[in-house]
Image (tube, rainbow, N blue to C red):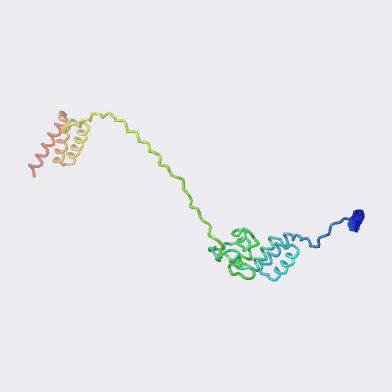
């Protein structure tokens, strides 16, 4: 029969054995045998993307496999891997719209502009059936995945019609009394003198009939002029003599 003292001595021996085993391991925890990932520099990612843009997919695959082996969780490397292995319509979607290539456009620049990531250039090239080096020409039509951007209409500012000021009414000018025209046969000394001079000239030219007409007009313009009356009487006498002799 095992006594209590024997049981205690047996337990102490087991404890000492475990302590010795722990000390023999130098107290170091077991080391993990899993290899740590080595980050791939961005320059290597760009180099692989450049190979794809130049159409060298074979070389790109080789470098991509080596890079993924070092850094399997690298998101950029996964994008490049999907660009090679997966269906571009599965990645980018079936809906698309037309885009006309402008001078200076590149497949990488369009991927950055429309897809938000230059590393998706190979996806965009395959989406459009472009194999090999993706050289674009101005005027070329590409399909851009997604919905076309909405063009917001230009809102013109409301034109407020300003009330037009009522033009001031011109002040009424007091009418001036009309100047009555001189009655017919009124005295006109100046015109009478001109008619007399013309009548005398006609008389000197041997045309007494015309002289009578002009002097009669002069007499009507200046009825009280005795000189004109005398010239008229003389012209009438001469005219009568000429007519009698004919």
Q: Quadrant of the N terminus?
A: bottom right
Q: Point out the residue furthest to the left here.
A: 244
Q: Quadrant of the C terminus?
A: top left
As rendered, which of 74 and 217 lies closer to the eye?
Answer: 74
x, y percent for residue 114: 59, 59
Q: Residue at x 40, y 39 (%)?
A: 162
One can see residue 76 in this view: yes
Q: Name the quadrant containing residue 73.
A: bottom right
Q: Please indicate, yes or no, whether residue 23 appears anywhere in the rendered image.
A: no
Residue at the spot x=10%, y=41% of the render? 242
Q: Is residue 204 above or below residue 104?
A: above
Q: Residue furthest front?
A: 1
* Relative side of 156 to 29, left or right: left
Q: Is residue 183 left or right of residue 173?
A: left
The residue closer to the viewer here, 153 or 228, is 153
From the top left corner, tell me how far across and down residue 210 is, in percent: 15, 41
> Where, by quadrant of the figure, is residue 43 drawn?
bottom right
Q: Please state the horizontal and vertical placement of residue 133, each as a whole percent of the image.
A: 64, 69
Vertical side of 62 occupied by 243: above or below: above
Q: How many marks?
A: 0
Query: What residue is rendered at 15% in x and 30% in y?
Result: 223
Place of residue 229 in the rendered image (x, y in percent of width and height, measured from the top left): 14, 31
| Closest to the observer, 55 or 11 | 11
């Amino acid at each position: 029969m095992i006594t209590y003292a024997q049981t205690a001595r047996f337990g102490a021996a087991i404890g000492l054995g475990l302590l010795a085993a722990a000390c023999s391991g130098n107290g170091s925890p077991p080391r993990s045998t899993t290899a740590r990932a080595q980050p791939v520099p961005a320059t290597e990612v760009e180099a692989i993307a450049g190979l794809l843009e130049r159409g060298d997919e074979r070389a790109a695959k080789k470098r991509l496999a080596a890079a993924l082996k070092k850094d399997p969780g690298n998101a950029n490397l996964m994008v490049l891997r999907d660009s090679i292995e997966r269906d571009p319509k599965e990645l980018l979607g079936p809906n698309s719209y037309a885009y006309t290539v402008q001078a200076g456009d590149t497949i990488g620049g369009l991927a950055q502009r429309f897809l938000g990531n230059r590393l998706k250039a190979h996806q965009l090239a395959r989406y459009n059936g472009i194999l090999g080096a993706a050289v674009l020409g101005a005027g070329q039509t590409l399909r851009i995945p997604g919905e076309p951007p909405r063009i917001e209409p230009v809102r013109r500012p409301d034109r407020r019609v300003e009330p037009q000021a009522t033009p001031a009414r011109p002040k009424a000018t007091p009418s001036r009394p009309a100047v009555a025209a001189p009655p017919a046969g009124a005295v006109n000394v100046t015109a009478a003198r001109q008619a007399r001079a013309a009548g005398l000239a006609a008389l000197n030219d041997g045309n007494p009939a015309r002289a009578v007409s002009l002097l009669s007009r002069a007499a009507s313009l200046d009825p009280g002029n005795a000189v004109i009356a005398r010239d008229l009487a003389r012209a009438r006498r001469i005219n009568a003599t000429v007519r009698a002799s004919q």
